[in-house]
Image: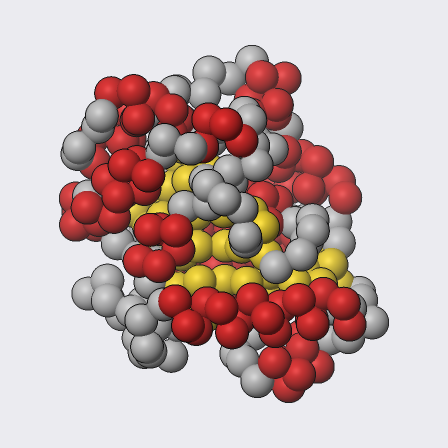
């Protein structure tokens, strides 16, 4: 199992939408792998309202894992929701307000500890931590992640914030562990190539603005042909494949 953590350095670049899009497309982009999306944003979940509106039980999510003091992969998966019959697209919902995130350190440690069990289930983990810098952010998950993906928009203020965040991530994470940048919101003033040169970092295939597909994902809509063919999911499939190629067949991650 590989853990891919998605985060941002500044406000609202679309971390949750991107995490959902990657989770929905993972099984089709990464051979023989499924994805478990962990909603670890301490500010509060942007996914829960969609589940409520769609009438889908959340399965307990991270709070259920914490209450049960889960210690195995099966315990964790029991509190997740599968969005497809094959259970290759699963979501572990998060907290509804920041105060609930304070005691969740043990949950993040559990997810790291059950890595080998999830590997046997052929699942990779995509973690949505939202914006970096929150008091209750899941530091253990960020530090232990095989790959951190920093999202940014292609604007000068966003890229400046991303530069500072990258320096912080490189300081706190083990040497050689990959960090990638993902530019979202195409078209924007600067392309992914411009951002790569400015930050001297590898970038992933960028994601476009796609209001319709973003809303469909937030409402937990079925993956219809229209959604599958949307600009967002077509680009997310390419991005998921690029991330999947970072991991070796043995589940180990290539050095940056």
* Residue 224 visible in this rendered orientation of the protein: no
Does the image show residue 127?
yes
**Which of the pair 35/104 is nearer the observer?**
104
Which quarter of the figure has residue 195? bottom right
Residue 181 placement: quadrant: bottom right
Compared with 34, 82 (above or below) is above
User: What residue is shown at x 45% (from left), y 32% (from top)?
Assistant: 101
x and y percent of residue 98 in the render?
A: 53, 31
Q: How far across and how far down the image is residue 243, in percent?
A: 43, 65
Which residue does the image show at 37% across and 41% down from the upper left? 36
Residue 236, x across and y down, in percent: 57, 56
Q: Relative to 135, is 143 on the left or the right?
A: left
Left or right placement of residue 81 versus residue 73 in this view: right
Q: Quadrant of the N terminus?
A: bottom left
**Residue sitting at x 33%, y 39%:** 105
- Is residue 126 shown above or below 226? below
């Amino acid at each position: 199992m590989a853990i891919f953590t998605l985060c941002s350095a500044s406000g609202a670049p679309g971390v949750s939408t991107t995490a959902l899009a990657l989770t929905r497309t993972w099984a089709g982009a990464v051979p023989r792998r499924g994805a478990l999306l962990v909603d670890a944003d301490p500010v509060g979940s942007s996914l829960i309202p969609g589940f409520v509106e769609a009438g889908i039980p959340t399965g307990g999510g991270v709070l259920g894992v914490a209450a049960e003091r889960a210690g195995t992969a099966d315990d964790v998966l029991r509190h997740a929701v599968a969005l497809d019959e094959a259970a290759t697209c699963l979501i572990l919902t998060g907290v509804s307000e920041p105060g609930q995130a304070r005691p969740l350190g043990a949950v993040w440690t559990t997810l790291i500890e059950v890595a080998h069990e999830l590997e046997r289930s052929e699942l990779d983990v995509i973690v949505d931590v939202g914006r970096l810098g929150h008091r209750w952010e899941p530091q253990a998950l960020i530090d232990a992640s095989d790959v951190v993906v920093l999202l940014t928009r292609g604007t000068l203020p966003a890229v400046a914030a991303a530069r500072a965040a990258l320096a912080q991530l490189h300081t706190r994470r083990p040497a050689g562990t990959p960090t990638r940048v993902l530019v979202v919101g195409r078209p924007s003033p600067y392309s992914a190539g411009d951002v790569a040169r400015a930050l001297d970092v590898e970038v992933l295939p960028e994601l476009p603005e796609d209001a319709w597909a973003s809303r469909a994902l937030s409402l937990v809509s079925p993956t219809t042909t229209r959604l599958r063919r949307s600009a967002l999911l077509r680009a997310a499939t390419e991005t998921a494949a690029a991330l999947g190629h970072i991991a070796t067949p043995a589940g180990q991650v290539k050095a940056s």
